[in-house]
Amino acid sequence: MNLKTLLLVALAFVLVAPGGVLAQEKVGTTGVNFLKIGPSSRGVALADAFLPMANDASTLWYNPGGMVNVKSSELIFSHVSFPAQVNYEYIGYLHPLPSLGAAVGVQLFGLYTDDMIETTPEYPYGTGRTFMASDFAAGLSYAQSLTDKFSVGSTIKFLQENLADKVARGWSVDVGTYYDTGWRSLTLAMIISNFGPDMQFISEPFPMPIVFKFGAAANLIDDGTNRLTMALEGIHPNDNREELHIGFEYGFQEKAFLRVGRKINGWKRSTQEEFNDDAENNNPYLEYPVLDEDGLSWDGLSFGGGVYFPGIGLTVDYAYATYAYLGNIHRFSLLYSIR
């Protein structure tokens, strides 16, 4: 099989994987699902189809195999405010080691609530005490170039989940690859994320939210001033149906950027009645509807932009994503290149 045929097969897999595989859905059967929250506003605006692009510090989370593409040390900060006073924080640092053809990095991130009033059957209006819930992860990453076009990387994450005075601890591993085909700017990437042993909360064990991803990206336009990149990513989680993520990024002189993305979990968007009739999810091509109070939402759609300030090495990114009942979430992240 020649290279061109191999690439066409890989792209076909990306396109058909989300809808063509009959997988039993096990929604709500895994824990520490904060591990699925993408930290980068750039990645979120692209519907998280960032696996095969992997060229800034957020690749620590998206694909450690692409860390060697980053040419200078970078810091990334991100904050997201979700409904119900739930907050998400992320900080990552990536440091290239060009003499070794390698890169190292560290990341800290977590999800936490504000203080909540403790209630009991005896005191339904409050005991006078408060508690909070939180998830925390600390990750160490290493990537190595195996050839001038292929690299592999891994992250080990130490995890902790807290609810009031109860604690669960565990660990997981991400392993990712990145391949620059050298053919028309096409890149391919794969990753398995959150692979690790079950964690246990009090006496109940729960599995990790393991996810397998395969992606491809290529420049549709690149004339030195204008660049338009398209990325496709197939997602196979162990606790939900498959998805296809599609993202487009336009860059003007690599200083101003516009992005749009869409998450798709079926080829035909159903009505509520059609979805109810398919209660056993026998039709993998039927996309589930996510409804808000006014009817169908723009669930899965995201867009955003960014500005790079070369004089100070700072990039400011913004993303807007829709989550139906959770509302519309605005995100900002900062990326700083250390020279």
Image (tube, rainbow, N blue to C red):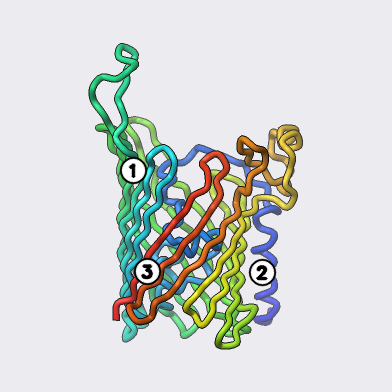
Q: As shown in the figure, which amino acid type bears the numbered disc 2?
A: Leu
Residue holding disc 1: 112
Please report the residue visible at 67 percent of the width from the left and 52 percent of the height from the top.
21
Q: At 67% from the left edge and 38% from the top edge, which residue is drawn?
A: 295
The residue sitting at 36% across, 41% down in the picture is: 199
Marked residue nearer the N-terminal end (2 or 3): 2
Per the image, the residue denoted by label 2 is 11
Give 145 or 321, whichever is nearer the viewer.
321
For mark 2, give the secondary structure: helix
Tag shown at residue 6: none
- Relative placement, left or right, of 25 versus 310 is right
Residue displayed at 29% across by 77% down: 338
> Comparing marks 1 and 2, which lies closer to the viewer?
1
Asked which secondary structure carries label 3, the reply is strand
Quickly name the residue at label 3: 335
Q: Amino acid at mark 1?
A: Tyr
**First reached walking from the N terminus: tag 1 or tag 2:** 2
The C terminus: image quadrant: bottom left
Whichever of callouts 1 and 3 sits on the residue coming sooner in the sequence is 1
Give left or right: position of 146 versus 140. right
Where, quadrant-wise, is the N terminus in this rendering? bottom right
